[in-house]
Structures are given as C-alpha cells and as structure tokens.
Image (cartoon, rainbow, N blue to C red):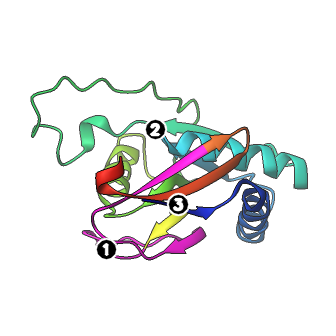
Amino acid sequence: MKRVILEFEHADLILTRLCHQLVEQHQDFSNSALIALQPRGTILGVAIKEKLKELFKIDATLGALDTTFHRDDFRRTDRTLIPNSMEMNFEIEGKKLVLIDDVLYTGRSIRAALDTINDFGRPASIELMTLINRKYRREVPIQPDYVGGHIDSRTDDYVKVEWEGNNCKVWIIKDTDK
C-alpha cells in the first residue's frame, strides 16, 4: 500500500519557506555553507541552492558529503561498499554549516555526517535541514533545525522521495510493497 504525503505542487512552496528560514538565520551566506549528504540529500541541496539564487540572488556554497566509512554499520556487511565522490572544495573552519538530507529517521546517518565533517575541520556551528522528519524511532538524540514536513510512520514503513527537476513527491510505502 502506497500513500502520497507530498505532491509535486507543494514542493516549491516548501523549498521557498525553507530558503526564507535560511536567509533569516544566515543573511547573505558570506560565512555559511550548505553540505548535502550523499546520495539522496544532494538533490535537495541543489534545489535549495538554486532557490536561494532565484529568490535572493545568493550564490551559496554547496558541498556533497559521503559518510560511507563513518557509518556505524560499516563493518557489519559482507558486501563491498562503494563510496560516492565527495565535493568539499572549500574550508569549513569557522563557517556556519547547514547539513542537508532528504529524510531524518533514526539519526544514524546524521551522526556519521557529523563525524565526517570533523575530518575537514571545526565549523562555527552545524544546523540540520531535512525535507521529511520521521518523528518516531530516533536512535540518537538529533533533531532538525529546518523541516519541510513532519510525518508519523510505523517502523516497517519506507519513505521514498521522488524528484522531478526541483519538485518532489514523497510516498510512504508499507515494507511489503518496496
């Protein structure tokens, strides 16, 4: 069973709201940067960067972070892990960072991202933006600063974000339908 929780038409409104919140907090982004989590957070990161440019003429710095070797399940599988390429072509020392991912569930991916960021230096601060916050079943004490939407879902549900350009549709899919 599939249930749509976000339609394409609403994505632009959500991106606009998130960008207004970012500008309220970071003004012109002169000492701020966006860091999107590979692989699924990068599409949202690019959409936010483009929307900031469209709305406010702000060309925000955007990086793409791979957390493969900082995940806590890294050595718990026999399959070969293939990391994504990282695009962190800027200094993070002393910058205000906004970490971006599509869905926040257990918080383990964000914990891995925080560990990975430490390899690049010490930022002034780190905030979290997520398109969807699955409020239940958090395993580490991490909460988003910027949220597109909150959903209540069961443990066996799967949340799928489908992008078409800068618009997205979000589904909740029962585990048996994946």
Return the residue at label 2.
38
Local SS, label 3: loop
Image point 42% across, 59% down: which residue? 1
Magenta-colored span: 135-162
Return the residue at label 3.
124
Foreground mark, 2 or 3, reads 2
Question: Would you identify the image quadrant in which residue 67 lies?
Answer: top left
Rendered location of residue 122, percent (x, y)? 44, 52
Is disc 2 surrounded by few (<14), some (14 to 19) or many (20+) residues within 10 Å? many
Local SS, label 1: loop
* Residue 45 in view, yes or no: yes
Return the residue at label 1.
141
Q: Is residue 159 left or right of residue 16?
A: left
> Which amino acid, mark 1?
Pro
Separation (CA) of disc 2 from disc 3: 22 Å
List the single residue furthest toward the front. Answer: 1
Above-or-below relation of 80 to 164: above
In the rendered structure, are the residues bearing label 2 and label 3 in contact, judged by CB atoms less than 8 Å apart? no
Above-or-below relation of 73 to 114: above
